[in-house]
Amino acid sequence: MAQTEFHLSTTGPGLYEFSDGVARWVSGTGVVEGLLTLFVRHTSCSLVIQENADPQVRGDLEAFFARLVPPSTDPAMSYLRHTYEGPDDMPAHIKSALLPVSLTIPVARGRPVLGTWQGIYLFEHRDAPHQRRVAAHLG
């Protein structure tokens, strides 16, 4: 069993890949087979496994979720009450409720078992830069 925490800096909304850091840590633990659990310790961002080959995929996902859940200043969101932390805050909580905040990934031969084009991403939903923490447990 091994545990660590990844610290990710974000500069605003978007998908931030940290697959390489996860793979380096897993390979250094000495664990050959097991399950890796990742858990983001915040309520306004998410974790996703997504394509890492074509950046248009990430851009399209960002555009889709921005359209699905616009800022609280949008007339369609006038029902929101939690607005004192900014127009992006409650929409970020909604996106986080729709998307996963934890991932489970098999580990074999000392590496996370991901598909050829799969990457592990933190999906930042807030407009301002943030320091995000992702807890990792490998057992």
Image (cartoon, rainbow, N blue to C red):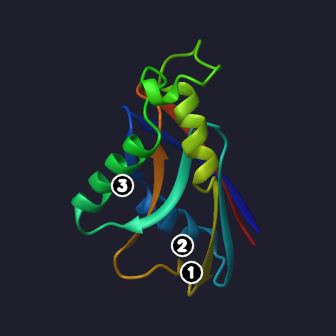
User: Where residue 61 sits in the image (x, y, percent)?
Assistant: 36, 55
The residues tagged by marks 3 and 2 sit, at their Cα atoms, a distance apart of 30 Å
The residue most toward the top is 84
Q: Please tell me the numbered disc located at residue 110.
A: 1
Q: What residue does disc 2 label?
A: 27
Q: Amino acid at mark 1?
A: Gly
Q: Is residue 12 left or right of residue 45?
A: left
3 and 1 marks in contact (CB < 8 Å): no
For the residue labelled by badge 3, is the local secondary structure a helix, a strand or a loop? helix
User: Where residue 22 sits in the image (x, y, percent)?
Assistant: 51, 62
Q: Amino acid at mark 2?
A: Ser
Q: In percent of the image, x 54 and y 54: which residue is there?
A: 47
Classify mark 1: residues with Cα within 10 Å, few (<14), some (14-19) or many (20+). Answer: some
User: Where residue 81 sits in the image (x, y, percent)?
Assistant: 65, 19
For the residue labelled by badge 2, is the local secondary structure a helix, a strand or a loop? helix
Is 101 placed above or below 37 here?
above
Q: In percent of the image, x 41 and y 27: which residue is there?
A: 127
User: Where residue 4 sits in the image (x, y, percent)?
Assistant: 66, 53
